[in-house]
Structure formats: C-alpha cells, structure tokens
Amino acid sequence: MIRACPVTMERRLHQTVDFKTHDLFIGEIVHAYCEEAVFTDGELDFAKVKPMLFDMPRKKYWRLGEPFADCWKMGLAWKPEG
C-alpha cells in the first residue's frame, strides 16, 4: 500500500488493450482500503480524500469540485425539444 494515499484499491487485471500512444487496463476492483480519517458519518468523504484526476489529451491534473446534482434524478426534469 502507498502510505500517502488515504484510499487504495486492489484490483484483478482482466485485459490490457494496447493503443498506439498508451495502454488501457480493464480490471475488477476486489478490495478497497480506506483510512478512517477520510470518512464522515460512516461514508467516504471525497472532500477529505482530495482525489486527483489525470486528463491525458490536455496533460493536466484536475481536482474534484462540489457535488451539483443527484444521480438518476437530475434528468427526470429534462424534456426533449420539439
């Protein structure tokens, strides 16, 4: 485990897809390890984890912002045009 990472996931590799510029790894998460310090009220708190996201095309690292909608609810108000 990496000591500096508050969340670590153990995975099982199923397939490696070799692209011209990079490899894509397809796998299954078999276990997750989390420090108690990244939980709030018994749930993983992403604000405490402070994850980094890598953007390959722009070669940038990103941070997560605040949540802005509930999954599977936001689209219920959407109506197609016409």
Image (cartoon, rainbow, N blue to C red):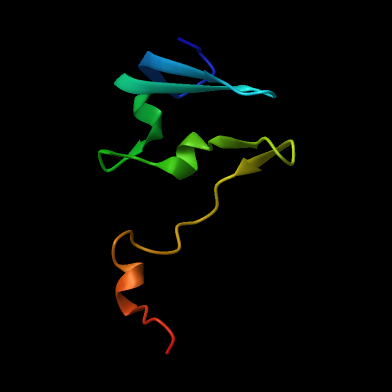
- Vertical arrangement, residue 34 with respect to residue 59, above or below: above
Percent position (x, y) of residue 47?
A: 48, 44
Percent position (x, y) of residue 17?
A: 51, 20
The residue that appears at 64% across and 42% down in the rendered structure is 62
Q: Nearer the viewer, residue 57 or 8?
A: 57
Q: Quadrant of residue 76?
A: bottom left
Q: Nearer the viewer, residue 16 or 31?
A: 16
Q: Nearer the viewer, residue 79 or 69?
A: 79
The residue that appears at 39% across and 14% down in the rendered structure is 13
- Vertical arrangement, residue 71 with respect to residue 60, above or below: below
Q: Please indicate, yes or no, whether residue 34 appears anywhere in the rendered image.
A: no
Quick one: quadrant of the C terminus?
bottom left
In the image: residue 78, left or right of residue 42: right
Which residue, as the protein is rendered here, is positioned at the far bottom? 82
Percent position (x, y) of residue 9?
A: 39, 20
In the image: residue 43, left or right of residue 17: left
